[in-house]
Image (cartoon, rainbow, N blue to C red):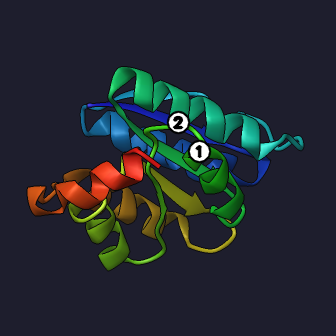
Amino acid sequence: MKIFIGNDHTATEMKNKIVEYLKTNGHEVVNIGTNSNDSVDYPDFGKEVATKVVEEKAMGIVICGTGIGISISANKVKGARAALCYEDQTAILAREHNDANILALGARMIAIEKAVRLVDIFLNAKFEERHSCRVNKLNNQ
């Protein structure tokens, strides 16, 4: 699976661990985020990941300090459905009920090991078609 990943300066370490996990599990990873701890603007990375995800019908992961700002940025791109997840159940339901195509994480909010687990859960959950009507409304707003 092709996965675009983007992050700000607060999330470089978390991003690197997630990329390592994804590559180990056979995913094609496109790193859009910064590779430095020097301050950058998370909206730029959220928008770029979301644009690529929508254009290529791929999946994405965005990470900033809380996950809030970068998910807001990603969700401004039509067709992007970024879900900020901190717990297993939200990662499952984001995919099953909302057909989320981008997982947002907060590097200052959760441990790296938990973030990797959430990525695995998110990528392995499947959209339940019975929610298509609602997702279509999201896509057309």
Helix, strand or loop under label 2? helix
Q: Which amino acid type is marked by label 2?
A: Ala
The N terminus, quarter of image: top left
**Residue 96 spot, x, y in % from top left:** 21, 63
**Residue 88 in view in this figure:** yes
Q: In this view, does 139 lie to the left or right of 70?
A: left
Residue 74 numbered tag: 1
**Residue 60 spot, x, y in % from top left:** 44, 40
**Residue 33 in view in this figure:** no
Which one is nearer the viewer's eye here, 24 or 1? 1
Q: Is residue 74 left or right of residue 45?
A: left
Q: In this view, does 111 lie above or below 122?
A: below
**Residue 40 spot, x, y in % from top left:** 85, 40
Q: Is residue 30 above or below residue 113?
A: above
Helix, strand or loop under label 1? helix
Residue 115 numbered tag: none
Rendered residue at 46%/69% (across/down):
85
Rendered residue at 66%/64% (across/down):
68
Q: Is residue 44 above or below residue 109?
A: above
Q: Which amino acid type is marked by label 1?
A: Ala
Which one is nearer the viewer's eye here, 45 or 14? 45
Rendered residue at 61%/44% (across/down):
76
Residue, disc 2: 50
Which one is nearer the viewer's eye here, 21 or 4? 4
Q: Residues within 10 Å of mark 2 (few under 14, many from 20)?
A: many
> From this viewpoint, which residue is outermost toward the top?
56
Rendered residue at 53%/28% (across/down):
51
Task: For marks 2 and 1, give the CA distance.
Answer: 5 Å
Whether residues under marks 2 and 1 lie with C-beta atoms below 8 angstroms apart, the answer is yes
